[in-house]
């Protein structure tokens, strides 16, 4: 049985997974069903991936939308104010809207643009219109779900309702956010959010319990929805349905985006929950590496995966971590295997930009290289998902090499994690034993580090799987 996944991997997975889902689904928004699989019938691991950009608003590949922009505003308010300050969140939202974001939900736009105070604007709009159960508060709630998960069930569900009510006066939207918060709390603690659904439903306000119970039941499918997935019920229902039927993060994304409609928001919600379940290592690095975006009205900063990881850590522990490693003496690049070079951090950072770089450590900023994949793996015993990460990296390397790219593999020191991937390549692609692969790499790369026993164990499992596949 795999060791328990470290909570930090789940927290990072939740926030990054939400942004990844948003960016992945954006080009397919309001298109017909099945378009994602029609365009990408199999994983696209080469230079061009499923992060294709485009859509009606012309998103860049990997660019997130208003879903993540508003989520980041919630996150920054929680971290900077040290907790929930509803007036501050509302002010940040208003500043964002005034800056003219390319996409904003009708409900959110009406409330924020009303000129009314934060504590009455949404309620007054709901009283006038009678319609405020869109998914616009659910899409942005992953950061708050992370923050309040530390304070227990009652606190997280109460906060969800209060933050939702800033823009969505219909209590149905707040109950959906409350359910999501509690499922996220369970997942971040290493539990099964699907198994927790009956207990969570018992905490839903009685007037809303039956309707939420319908879309979250085992047998519900998106085809049974009575509203479009721009409404809060089918959005969360579809996310839970995909989590129930998928084998991994990538399949969750494929399932929800293939249903069409409000694909960026449904994938954003599903991505947050799936990221908490499968961890940061379960998110394909070809997607996480390119996710990015700005928050209108709040500076010119371009948010990338390292920023999201830092923010996730701050949401969970209350202190920002700095992943900028500074400058270190360069090692490499050196061609260790045919077409595959190795280096340490700055050896790779300052290498020729035609390399396709495989980064195995967290970076302050991405490199100037046109092709860079950033895999999430730590040089410790916390990588319960190391087999998944290693397979993802090796699959990407094989696709990139087949396209003719020179590959450059590195970690901070160029030793342990770099050695894991170089040895893994020889085990899987060349059929070597772990001992043979280790000797071959050590012969060409004297910086090889062998102190991490969990990496060697992962290579032994890889060798066994490769042998089994060869015998079939």
Image (cartoon, rainbow, N blue to C red):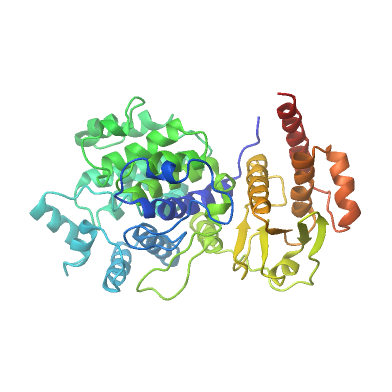
Which one is in front, 254 or 449? 254
Q: Taking 200 as reference, is 312 above or below it?
A: below
- Count of residue discs: 0
- Which residue is at a point 19% across and 62% down the rendered structure image? 111
- Which residue is at a point 44% across and 43% down the rendered structure image? 253
- Which residue is at a point 28% across and 53% down the rendered structure image? 136
In percent of width and height, residue 195 lies at 44, 29
Q: Can the viewer see residue 227?
A: yes
Which one is in front, 347 or 327? 347
Q: Tell me where residue 245 sits by quadrant.
A: top left
Q: Tell me where residue 436 sits by quadrant.
A: top right
The quadrant of the picture occupied by the N terminus is top right
Q: Taking 274 as reference, is 287 above or below it?
A: below
Q: Taking 265 as reference, is 299 above or below it?
A: below
The quadrant of the picture occupied by the C terminus is top right
In the image: residue 102, left or right of residue 396? left
In percent of width and height, residue 417 lies at 74, 52
In percent of width and height, residue 134 lies at 24, 49
In the image: residue 408, left or right of residue 202? right
Which one is in front, 126 or 102? 102
Q: Residue furthest bottom?
A: 299
Which one is in front, 30 or 329? 30
In the image: residue 116, left or right of residue 87? left
In percent of width and height, residue 447 lies at 85, 58
In the image: residue 413, left or right of residue 363? right
Q: Can the viewer see residue 454?
A: no
Q: Tell me where residue 406 sits by quadrant.
A: bottom right
């Amino acid at each position: 049985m795999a060791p328990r996944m470290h909570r930090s991997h789940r927290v990072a997975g939740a926030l990054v997974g939400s942004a990844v889902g948003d960016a992945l689904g954006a080009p397919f928004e309001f298109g017909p069903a099945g378009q994602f699989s029609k365009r990408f019938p199999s994983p696209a691991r080469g230079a061009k991936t499923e992060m294709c950009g485009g859509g009606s608003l012309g998103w860049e590949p990997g660019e997130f939308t208003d879903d993540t922009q508003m989520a980041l505003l919630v996150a920054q308010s929680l971290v900077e104010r040290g907790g929930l300050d509803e007036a501050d969140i509302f002010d940040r939202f208003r500043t964002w809207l005034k800056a003219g974001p390319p996409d904003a939900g009708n409900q959110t736009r009406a409330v924020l643009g009303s000129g009314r105070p934060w504590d009455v604007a949404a309620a007054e709009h709901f009283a006038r219109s009678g319609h405020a159960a869109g998914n616009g508060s659910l899409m942005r709630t992953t950061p708050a779900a992370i923050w309040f998960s530390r304070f227990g069930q009652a606190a997280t569900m109460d906060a969800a309702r209060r933050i939702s009510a800033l823009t969505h006066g219909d209590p149905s939207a707040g109950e959906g956010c409350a359910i999501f918060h509690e499922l996220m709390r369970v997942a971040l603690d290493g539990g099964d959010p699907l198994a927790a659904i009956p207990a969570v439903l018992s905490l839903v306000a009685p007037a809303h319990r039956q309707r939420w119970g319908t879309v979250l039941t085992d047998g519900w499918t998106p085809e049974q929805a009575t509203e479009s997935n721009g409404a809060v019920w089918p959005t969360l229902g579809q996310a839970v349905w995909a989590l129930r039927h998928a084998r991994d993060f990538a399949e969750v994304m494929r399932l929800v985006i293939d249903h069409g409609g409000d694909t960026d928001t449904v994938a954003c919600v599903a991505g947050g929950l799936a990221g908490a379940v499968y961890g940061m290592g379960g998110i394909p690095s070809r997607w996480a590496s390119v996710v990015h975006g700005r928050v209108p009205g709040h500076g010119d900063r371009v948010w990338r995966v390292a920023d999201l990881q830092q923010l996730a850590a701050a949401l969970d522990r209350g202190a920002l971590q700095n992943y900028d490693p500074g400058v270190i003496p360069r090692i490499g690049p050196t061609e260790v295997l045919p077409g595959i070079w190795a280096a340490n951090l700055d050896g790779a950072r300052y290498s020729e930009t035609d390399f396709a770089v495989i980064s195995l450590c967290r970076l302050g900023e991405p490199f100037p290289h046109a092709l860079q994949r950033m895999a999430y793996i730590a040089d410790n015993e916390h990588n319960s998902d190391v087999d998944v990460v290693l397979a993802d990296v090796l699959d990407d390397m094989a696709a990139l090499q087949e396209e003719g790219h020179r590959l450059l593999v590195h970690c901070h020191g160029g030793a342990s994690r770099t050695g894991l991937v170089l040895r893994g390549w020889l085990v899987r692609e060349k059929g070597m034993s772990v001992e043979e692969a280790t000797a071959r790499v050590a012969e060409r790369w004297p910086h090889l580090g062998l102190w991490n026993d969990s990496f060697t164990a992962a290579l032994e499992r890889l060798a066994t799987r490769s042998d089994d596949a060869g015998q079939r």
